[in-house]
Amino acid sequence: MALTAQDAGGRPETAAPYAIELRGISKSFGPVQANKDIDLRVAKGTIHGIIGENGAGKSTLMSILYGFYKPDRGQILVNGQPTAIADSQTAIRAGIGMVFQHFKLVQNFTVLENIILGAEDGGLLRPSLAKARGVLKRLAAEYQLNVDPDATIDELSVGHQQRVEILKALYRQADILILDEPTGVLTPAEADHLFRILQGLKDEGKTIILITHKLREIMEITDNVSVMRRGEMVASVRTADTSPEELAELMVGRKVLLNVEKSAATPGPPVLEVRDLTMVDDEGVERLRGISFDIRAGEILGIAGVSGNGQTQLLELLGGFPEKGARVGGTIRMNGEALDLTGTGSDAATRRARGIGHVPEDRQSEGLIMDFTAWENVAFGYHRAPEYNRGLLMDNQAIRQDAERKMDHFDVRPRNCHLAARNFSGGNQQKIVVAREIERNPDLLLVGQPTRGVDIGAIEFIHKRIVELRDAGKAVLLVSVELDEILSLSDRIAVMFDGRIMGERLPAETTTGELGLLMAGITETDRHDADAGIPPGHRHVETPPQERA
């Protein structure tokens, strides 16, 4: 697909200058060329999406634009003027702001203190705070960015913290905003509100650059989209002139199946039965509050929820990695037999011996030893298996051969089992972990965030393998913050909020809106009460007739 001035910026060459124009930007890190002769044009007052697989060079390119890196060659124009961006302060002075995926906020500072941090007017804070309060009030009203200026950051929801980051950039008079994966930790309702904010910013003449891997968001909110692959810009088009399927093919270089193909589940007997599971951590915080559910053979139970609502503790407890010092209650039965909740019988080795495989949420800190080779990581946790041992010694040759077979079966690239885990891309690291657990043919597979930070091609592959395991009669517990993933993979969906199961739904009988409300802790009863004007927690309970007298 040819890249033209009309395509790239969404307006003719003769119009006003572009908000951002990058010409021939290249950047290498040693032998790795992250960006190669990148041309990009972003029209003023538009929302411009940038997509690409992991390692495509998106973050490097935006880091150059925001002054974190200097390009090896190439030119940056801001509002038509050549601009040398030496650091982030230069970018801010040029009217560029950036909202990072992981917020840069001081948790025990107030909103107001975070807003002015680094932008104080002189040595006295009181005048700066007074000025900021007035500006903040105006910006909040103008862009639907309402947030309590005196609240400390650790008191705010993730969605409100993101608003603070946007306010920081606007306070510094940014006309161009870069947002990196802005909806990764938001509920659907929060994401919808963010999109309304972005639309409002656009209507006021601001320019937005949106980095996201979610094609649905690209189609919904952007005016134009640019696709990067292997460090190069391969296409820039009007969003209205393309489709998710075409964008996925441009990203990967081949056709990609975006929808999970699977037949209806045929559940068998219960494999996992959880009843009244509770957990209080060593600081006295109740992380799990009476969790109960079943998973049957031949089905996938998806757990939806915003990160931090007990999903991590649930997976770790089931997988044999309970938090140190935690107090646990309730019962867990695996194939009809009770599992220990504490003591030596609650460890990961015992769980594996009982037929539980575990793909942890954080592959790098919990699923792999990054400095060990791929073949060593394939044996991680299973190193005492008979096929890996010969007498008193480990059979390294057998492990290497098994690793090569698994890497071939799961299309791990490069297919070199002697490489350290850190030398593989995120998607291939995930494939190593998934291959290790699935190839053990567990009765129950625990999967946490299976495609977090994974390329779209690897997502398709991992989804297929999970469905194949289900079709082989195994049970799968899937935890994901991606609602599209939950809806497409799950046979049943449970929603967690604040350590509780808020409700259970069938994918065909629910919507992202309904799941989003449950993820925010709002039930059907709460909605009915709100419609009737009943405050939360004040539902009227009818007194039984025998008690009225």
Image: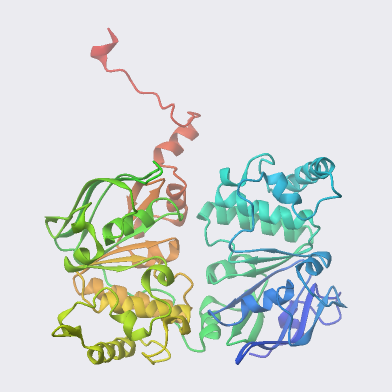
Residue 134 location (% of width, % of height): 80, 42
Quadrant containing the C terminus is: top left
The vertical placement of 489 against 531, above or below, is below
Q: Position of residue 368 (x, y in %)?
A: 38, 74
* Residue at the farthest top position: 549
Q: Position of residue 383 (x, y in %)?
A: 24, 78
Give the number of callouts: 0
Q: Relative to 208, is 418 above or below? A: below
Look at the image and tell me whether residue 257 can be seen: no
Residue 78 position by quadrant: bottom right
Quarter-of-image position of residue 470: bottom left
Residue in the picture at 62% in, 78% down:
58
Image quadrant assignment for residue 119: bottom right
Query: Which residue is rendered at x = 46% and y = 54% of the image?
Result: 306
Instruction: Please give the name of the residue rendered at 69% of the width and 41% of the height, measured from the top-left corner.
Output: 149
Residue 25: % across, % down = 73, 86
Residue lying at 31% horizontally and 17% vertically, measured from the top left: 543
Question: Looking at the rendering, in which quadrant would you find the N terminus?
Answer: bottom right
The answer to whether residue 450 is seen in the rendering is yes
- Colour theme: rainbow
Say left or right for 485 vs 391.
Answer: right
Q: Is residue 108 left or right of residue 20?
A: left
Asked if residue 407 lies left or right of residue 389, the reply is: right
Image height check: is 150 above or below 71?
above
Image position of 12 with respect to 178: above or below:
below
Instruction: Report whether 492 appears left or right of 258.
Output: left
Q: Residue placed farthest to the front in the image?
A: 392
